[in-house]
Image (cartoon, grey):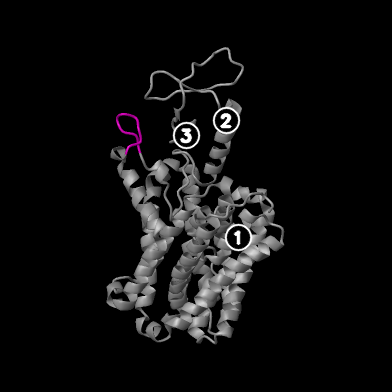
Amino acid sequence: MQSSLFSNGKAVSFIASNEAKPHNPTSKSKSLLLSDPKISSPLIFPSIPSSSFLKLTSQTNSIKSHFLKTTTNKYIHPLYSASSDSITTNEDGDGGGSGRSLRGWIELVGEVLSTAFPIWVALGCFLGLVKPNSFNWIKPQLTIIGLTITMLGMGMTLTFDDLKGALAMPKEVVAGFVLQYSVMPLSGFFVSKLLTLPSYYAAGLILVGCCPGGTASNIVTYLARGNVALSVLMTAASTLSAVVMTPFLTAKLAGQFVAVDAAGLLISTLQVVLLPVLFGALLNQYCRSLVNVVSPLMPPIAVVTVALLCGHAISRNASAILMSGQQVVLAVCLLHVSGFFFGYVLSRFLGIDVSSSRTISIEVGMQNSVLGLVLAGQHFGDPLTAVPCAVSSVCHSIIGSLLAGIWRYNKPTLKKD
């Protein structure tokens, strides 16, 4: 006997092929009675106990709720949109493609852009290298606006209940926070020393190492079978604390290479990170209907913003990058590989489970490079300081995606293994 189970979140139907046997209502075996909306008579599937099916359904819904919520309280990350919620029902009540609404198409575009996020960023950087004049129209004010909108989108995925969730995972959140603001800044400093980078590249590498976790890390964590709830909490914690940690650490470490305007970094981080994230969280808490309307636009805006800002940073320094680009790429790759490696190894050393250790590894290894781009452009005199930040966006996306692909097919079997 062969059977298949299909679920679209609205109805469950079984397709069974076996020898016809009459159903005995007086049989002691439990039967599962399900109603198919397209079949007038109920389908009876005698071989699955109802308790097991209800347990399976409960577990499935529990897992799904970590990443997706219902249409009235939907989790949409700035670089991800859920295709399962993008399809609306047509007149017949089924979820056919012909019934996709305008919102559904917008979410589909966002999902396509998000899935190929490293490719779009790499294309932006390549275009900036070969056609630098293509980005002359981008002004500093536009970069600030783009990053502010991106961080607002991230804030709209958070609720105050999510932020309170840190209390349920204090060990993991604290470990991730400490590793985020120790492994990456120190790696940037030592890599700069090891490769004897010019002062402007060293400052840029340390700056990106001192930035908070990147928004794309939540997607990579999901693909790597990590702890998505922890990923969201870590991104929020590192982002909110970046208003203090990023200027302080950059001044201490990069100050050995170039002059650093710590006060200016503090004000800029407050303006383009903390305020938009908090405002987005307030909107999600008290203006849910507005967030449900606006949120589908956030994935395409975020991806396009990152690609344009990275391409713009490369275009401003195209000739210098062509002369010494290999050194910058090597330095940035070493920075992020160190973050992924030590984030995982040190988490396991602290006794954190595999799933959460993967999450911490991804959170530590992936940085908010766009924040580094904006800060480098505003507060560092040499435009070459922004180059490591632009290269970082490509490198951490590619390395993180590869790591997610490996981990996805090596599923943790136990909570503590």
Marked residue nearer the N-terminal end (3 or 1): 3
Q: Quadrant of the C terminus?
A: bottom right
Residue 54: mark: 2
Packing grade of label 3 (10 A; few <14, some 14-19, many >=20) is few
Q: In the figure, residue 147 lies in which quadrant?
A: bottom left
Q: Main secondary structure of the magenta part?
A: loop
Nearer mark to the viewer, of 3 and 1 = 3
Q: Is residue 145 visible?
A: no
Can you give x and y, in whole percent of width and height, for residue 70 in the image?
A: 47, 38
Q: Is residue 157 visible?
A: yes
Q: Which residue is mark 3?
A: 5
Question: Is residue 307 shown above or below 195?
Answer: above
The magenta span reads: 88-96
Q: Which residue is mark 1?
A: 360
Q: Residue furthest front?
A: 19
> Secondary structure under badge 3?
strand
The residue that appears at 63% across and 51% down in the rendered structure is: 166
Marked residue nearer the N-terminal end (1 or 2): 2
The residue that appears at 71% across and 58% down in the rendered structure is: 351
Can you give x and y, in whole percent of width and height, for residue 294 in the image?
A: 38, 48
- Inter-mark Cα distance, 2 to 3: 14 Å
Residue type at the position of mark 3: Leu
Marked residue nearer the N-terminal end (2 or 3): 3
Nearer mark to the viewer, of 1 and 2 = 2
Residue type at the position of mark 1: Ile
Residue 91 in the magenta stretch? The answer is yes
